[in-house]
Image: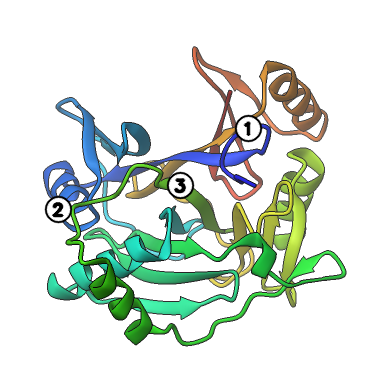
Amino acid sequence: MNFHTKPVTYVGEVGLKVLDLKEMTRFYKEVIGFELLEETESTAVLGAGGQALLKLEAVEGLTPKQDRYAGLYHFAILLPDRKELAKILIHLHNSGIRLGSSDHLVSEALYLSDPEGNGIEIYRDREPEEWNWNGGQVDMAVDPIDAEGLVQTARQAGEVWQGMPAGTVMGHIHLHVSNLPQAQKFYVDGLGFEIVTSMGGQALFLADQKYHHHIGLNVWNGIGIPALPEKEAGLNYYTLVLEDEEKRSRLAEHLQTMGAEITEHENYLETTDPSGNHIRLTV
């Protein structure tokens, strides 16, 4: 099953408020391997295979993030297969990028930060048949990655890294929130996601249609943290792609009955989770 096409609800694009648009654009093109799809004096839209996945926006008067706020923990770029993960691992190593890594049982992942401190995960999924479910929850772990095996996979493929391949998608987003029960109510009761993994009152992983997670939520920055200020760099918004207009209208009405504000724009409806993270509902 493809967990990043309709009728599944999935994360489509992430928007970042940035301090240095030129340097951030360079990083996402040369280091991450996105293609530049659109550019203005104050924005850059990047992606893979012609699909927009990331929008960088220079905002006047922006300052660096200086405190513990709600907002982005990381956004996660999902590659089509293990070979592509192997190729980018070698590329990032050769580029001198500091990397973390983990085998999560459901996936293999690399972790890094962009020049302004935004967290990035780059990963590949194992086949859903290989995931282990227990009582409605999927088994995930933080095990060491088989880096040697990945390098071997790249060598056997005999291909050199040439950027993000077509078929790359925004796999999931992981957010810092201020209150986990409030966030759960909003995302589960309001937006219809299911809890697929719970980590002892510290983190929740949510999904649609039995993916291992489309959204991660955690209180690792502290309970009761404030929303990211408008004039501080970091997460601007992320989009949720919904099946159709009918589902979007239904969810919007439901969120309003729960007290969430909905703002109408030309191509999307915008709402905010209880921690101040902006979400654009698109179809």
Q: In the drawing, what numbered circle is on residue 186?
A: none
Whether residue 88 sits left or right of residue 200 in the image: it is: left
Name the mark nearer the viewer: 1 or 3: 1
- Residue found at x 83% / y 29%: 257
Q: Which residue is farthest right?
A: 135
Horizontal and vertical percent for residue 87? Answer: 26, 66
Circle count:
3
- Could you tell me how far apart the alpha carbons at marks 2 and 1 are, in whole angstroms? 31 Å
- Could you tell me how far apart the alpha carbons at marks 1 and 3 are, in whole angstroms? 14 Å
- Residue found at x 64% / y 25%: 262
Q: In this orientation, which residue lies closer to the viewer: 208 or 73? A: 208
Q: Residues within 10 Å of mark 2 (few under 14, many from 20)?
A: some
- Could you tell me how far apart the alpha carbons at marks 3 and 2 are, in whole angstroms? 18 Å
Q: In this orientation, which residue lies closer to the viewer: 136 or 67? A: 136
- Residue found at x 35% / y 64%: 83
Disc 1 residue type? Lys
Q: Up-down: is 61 above or below 129?
A: above
Q: Residues within 10 Å of mark 3 (few under 14, many from 20)?
A: many
Residue 159 lies in quadrant: bottom left
Q: Up-down: is 154 above or below 14?
A: below
Please give the residue where the numbered disc 1 appears in the rendered image. Answer: 6
Horizontal and vertical percent for residue 138? Answer: 73, 68
Q: In the drawing, what numbered circle is on residue 30?
A: 2
Please give the residue where the numbered disc 3 appears in the rendered image. Answer: 170
